[in-house]
């Protein structure tokens, strides 16, 4: 059997021929693009030591390019990933803050804990679920990306640190084939404009480059009252070809802001169905407001400051990287990838709180606030009557009797999530068919964030620029002043550093012409250091918030608003703050062994068993009993969560038909902390499932592609809440799918991407559920000529109201829950011009 030379097992990078074919497709007609998929599925990828084609590899690998992504009508980077089998990408948070998981591995909180997101073979962040710093917040899909590849399953744990579930890798265009494109996109039924561009080519026979990026501005897919999606990105690389390989330099600058949508009021209609509450539709509107954009608050050290809610998720990245790939001796290959990144930003958005009353009639709030409350001298407030008036907006001063909600303003500064990453490896191809790779991975990840003194406001429940409320008792004492209920709810300062060191080894060999075996091992060591300073839930000092020279009820440290501000308004100068030192080392060894049996050129069987691990990182500090006073780990804490996975698969691939099927069984340990509920837990989950992925060129004009995943998952152990054992994990459906039929001709194409799920429970108590659904995403492209095209895409064409998560696990029909729905219908018109 012919040995296939590949570039790198870690990056999943394709051979040079792929980069050229992807760029060449840009000038093809739709029919030519469809036919080119025959070649795409045969491209050699590096998903196993020693290399193999996608057909031969003993792992589950998927790859798709810009043409495939267009059919998904994505509105965020996370929505690009729904073309991948086995992956749940919940993008109900807007342009960032997505929840991503794989193969029944739990999605207990936010981010992508067990799944890593890579750019050109190195992680965007070492940990995908950093509090308020999800990896997708700092990753943007644009035309700089040639293709997206993913390896799923346990083998990923030995290809990359902290990725026992899988790796999704965005691989850059590098300009081997010259030419470029420029295009604009417009929101047809929402306000957003976007410009995309790319250009690349040869500088000389052995030097080529590629530059691409985007700029955008607008309100975004939901009504916020202001332009919340604003910014852009530029990515550049230059490659020098050498006689024995290449050296490539990368640069990326991302400066972007997107509105993020946190749980907000949703109506429970019953039987797994939900909908808008009166006056507010959470799928197309937001609780953000043009009347409440600038907030006077305190930093985590008690100093007054102003914050702009319009910043939303603010993402700033400056990164520089180098890739060296050389044949340093006969059949001996050196590969080194390096990147250093300066990463900062912020996260600010309204979250619907349940205190002092859940979202609903404003009278519920007045009763909860006044009853039992006292002033600064300990005297009971006069609750014979209360007054509620609009504090701002065009109708300020008017009496208000409608719906209200408590806005707990999530407010975090991302001071530093910068990292330095290097991956070095040597690969030797031996004459006897053995292929050996040894390498060393190093990562230095900072986590420095300030959870500023989160404030709580009471506002009108209104999707058209919510207004602040002022609430007074019968004597005119303000219980809520200009919307402000509490000036200080939370104040944490994180200053952490995590160094990861990981030697690894991969070996692959051929037992015969049709049997391939590979094994890999990786030993990760995490060195954690730093400090967490916490002054939660109250302070000890008066503060004149409105600057009128009088300490009023809302500003009085002795006053108690229904127990919420018990102990004071703001903790100034860190009085009474608690500090947790972090100073520990944790270790984990991952391994994977697998093999392929090539039944024929078109049929392959494979099997694999793996054990992987993931360092818990910053969330460990929110869990009691994990760290000693000196920062070391307690005897019951390992610092890692682990997965054990077994998979067996079958692949069939011909010119017109491709079908991959993988049966998997997964056991996962998960240690987690939730910010919103304050819950912490240590659990074990078990999942068994089946992934199906396929493509069928039915005729010259009809193409079908898609994926379907069945998962049977349960909570098998829970240290804190044994009653949950046997329940289905939250947000885990039995079936999920994306099916894409397409009709193509020489000048136009039209199709639909059908994304669906069976019912799932929104919390682990298995009471409240979301009914099954299918989202219909439509797309069409017309080629005016070989260079100019017009495209229309419609996401959620039938305007389904679907929630991905809920803060409440039980609720009566007709009541409100705090949930995150998917976007309602959004339509985008795109124009694209390509040139040499």
Image: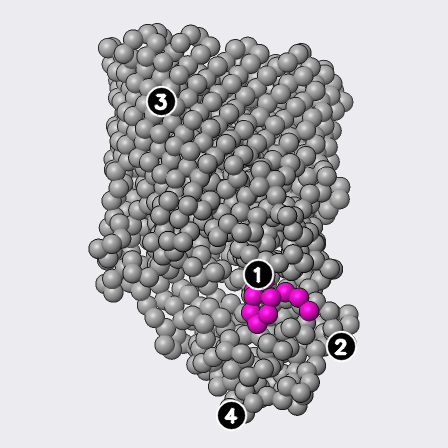
Secondary element type, mark 4 = loop
The numbered dot on residue 351 is 1
Q: Earlier in the sequence, mark 2 or mark 4?
A: 4
Q: Residues within 10 Å of mark 2 (few under 14, many from 20)?
A: some
Secondary element type, mark 3 = strand
Tags 2 and 4 touching, CB below 8 Å: no
The foreground one among 98 and 817 is 817
Highlighted magenta segment, given as a residue range: 350-361
At x 68% / y 29%, what residue is drawn?
752
Q: Residues within 10 Å of mark 4 (few under 14, many from 20)?
A: few
- Between circles 4 and 3, the one closer to the viewer is 3
Q: Is residue 656 above or below residue 337?
A: above
How far apart are the alpha carbons under marks 4 and 1? 32 Å
Q: Is residue 809 above or below residue 652?
A: below
Q: Indicate the quadrant containing the C terminus: top left, top right, bottom left or bottom right.
A: top right
The numbered dot on residue 377 is 4
Residue 506 percent location from the top left of the image: 28, 26
Residue at which label 2 appears: 399
Q: Earlier in the sequence, mark 4 or mark 1?
A: 1
Tags 4 and 3 touching, CB below 8 Å: no
- Between circles 3 and 1, the one closer to the viewer is 3
How far apart are the alpha carbons under marks 2 and 4? 29 Å
Q: Indicate the quadrant containing the N terminus: top left, top right, bottom left or bottom right.
A: top left
How far apart are the alpha carbons under marks 4 and 3? 72 Å
Q: Residues within 10 Å of mark 3 (few under 14, many from 20)?
A: many
How far apart are the alpha carbons under marks 1 and 2? 25 Å
| Residue 357 included in the magenta stretch of the image | yes
Q: Earlier in the sequence, mark 4 or mark 3?
A: 4
Secondary element type, mark 2 = loop
Residue at which label 3 appears: 607
Res 86 seen here: yes
Question: Horizontal placement of 562 versus 698: left or right?
Answer: left
């Amino acid at each position: 059997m012919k040995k296939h030379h590949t570039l790198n097992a870690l990056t999943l990078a394709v051979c040079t021929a792929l980069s050229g074919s992807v760029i060449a497709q840009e000038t093809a007609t739709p029919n030519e693009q469809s036919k080119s998929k025959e070649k795409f599925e045969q491209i050699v990828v590096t998903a196993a030591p020693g290399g193999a084609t996608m057909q031969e590899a003993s792992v589950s690998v998927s790859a798709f390019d810009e043409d495939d992504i267009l059919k998904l009508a994505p509105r965020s980077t996370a929505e690009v990933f729904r073309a991948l089998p086995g992956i749940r990408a919940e993008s109900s948070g807007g342009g960032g803050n997505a929840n991503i998981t794989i193969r029944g591995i739990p999605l207990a909180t936010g981010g992508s804990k067990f799944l890593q997101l890579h750019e050109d073979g190195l992680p965007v962040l070492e940990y995908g679920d950093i509090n308020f710093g999800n990896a997708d917040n700092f990753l943007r899909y644009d035309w700089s990306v040639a293709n997206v590849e993913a390896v799923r399953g346990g083998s990923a744990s030995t290809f990359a640190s902290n990725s026992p579930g899988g790796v999704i890798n965005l691989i850059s265009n590098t300009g081997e084939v010259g030419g470029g494109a420029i295009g604009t996109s417009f929101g047809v039924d929402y306000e957003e404009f976007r410009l995309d561009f790319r250009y690349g080519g040869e500088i000389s026979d052995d030097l080529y480059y590629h530059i691409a990026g985007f700029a955008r501005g607008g309100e975004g897919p939901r009504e916020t009252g202001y332009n919340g999606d604003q910014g852009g990105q530029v990515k550049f690389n230059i490659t020098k070809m050498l006689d024995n390989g290449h050296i490539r330099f990368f640069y990326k600058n991302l400066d972007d802001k997107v509105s993020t949508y946190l749980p907000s009021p949703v109506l429970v209609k019953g039987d797994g169905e939900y909908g808008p509450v009166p006056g507010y539709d959470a799928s197309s509107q937001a609780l953000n407001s043009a009347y409440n954009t600038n907030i006077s608050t305190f930093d985590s050290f008690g100093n007054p400051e102003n914050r702009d809610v319009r910043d939303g998720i603010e993402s700033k990245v400056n990164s520089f990287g180098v890739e060296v790939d050389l044949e340093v001796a006969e059949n001996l290959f050196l590969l080194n990838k390096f990147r250093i990144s300066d990463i900062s930003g912020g996260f600010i958005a309204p979250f619907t709180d349940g205190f002092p009353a859940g979202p609903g009639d404003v009278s519920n709030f007045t009763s909860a606030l006044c009853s039992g409350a006292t002033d600064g001298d300990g005297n009971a407030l006069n609750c014979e009557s209360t007054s509620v008036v609009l504090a701002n907006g065009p109708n300020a001063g008017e009496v208000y009797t409608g719906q209200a909600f408590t806005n707990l303003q999530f407010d975090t500064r991302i001071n530093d999530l910068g990292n330095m990453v290097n991956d070095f490896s040597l690969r030797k191809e031996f004459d006897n068919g053995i292929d050996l790779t040894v390498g060393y991975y190093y990562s230095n990840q900072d986590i420095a964030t300030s959870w500023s003194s989160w404030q709580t406001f009471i506002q009108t429940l209104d999707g058209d620029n919510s207004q602040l409320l002022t609430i007074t008792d019968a004597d005119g004492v303000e219980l809520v002043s200009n919307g402000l209920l509490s000036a200080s709810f939370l104040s944490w300062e994180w200053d952490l550093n995590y160094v990861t060191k990981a030697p690894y080894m991969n070996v692959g060999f051929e037992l015969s012409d049709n049997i391939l075996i590979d094994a890999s091992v990786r030993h990760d060591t995490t060195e954690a250091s730093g400090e967490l300073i916490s002054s939660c839930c109250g302070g000890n000092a008066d503060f004149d918030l409105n600057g009128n020279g009088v300490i009023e009820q809302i500003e009085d440290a002795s006053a108690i608003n229904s127990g919420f501000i018990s102990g004071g308004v703001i903790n100034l100068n860190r009085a009474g703050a608690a500090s947790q030192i972090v100073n520990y080392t944790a270790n984990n060894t991952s391994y994977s062994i697998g093999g392929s049996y090539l039944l024929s050129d078109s049929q392959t069987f494979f099997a694999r068993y793996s054990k992987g691990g993931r360092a818990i990182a910053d969330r460990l500090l929110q869990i009691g009993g994990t760290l000693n006073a000196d920062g070391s780990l307690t005897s019951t804490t390992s610092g890692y969560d682990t997965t054990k996975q077994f998979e067996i698969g079958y692949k069939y691939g011909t010119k017109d038909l491709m079908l991959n099927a993988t049966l998997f069984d997964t056991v996962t340990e998960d240690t987690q902390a939730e910010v919103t509920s304050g819950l912490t837990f240590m659990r074990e989950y078990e999942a068994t499932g089946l992934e199906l992925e396929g493509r069928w060129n039915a005729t010259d004009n009809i193409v079908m592609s898609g994926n379907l995943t069945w998962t049977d998952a349960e909570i098998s152990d829970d240290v804190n809440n044994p009653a949950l054992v046997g329940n289905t994990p939250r947000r885990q459906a039995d079936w999920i799918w994306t099916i894409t039929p397409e009709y193509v001709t020489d000048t136009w194409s039209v199709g639909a991407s059908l994304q669906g799920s069976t019912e799932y429970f929104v919390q682990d108590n298995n009471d409240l559920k979301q009914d099954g659904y299918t989202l219909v995403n439509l797309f069409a492209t017309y080629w005016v000529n070989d260079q100019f095209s017009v495209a229309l895409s419609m996401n959620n064409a039938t305007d389904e109201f679907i929630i991905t998560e809920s803060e409440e696990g039980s609720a009566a029909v007709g009541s409100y829950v705090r949930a995150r729905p998917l976007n309602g219908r959004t339509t985008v018109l795109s124009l694209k011009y390509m040139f040499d």
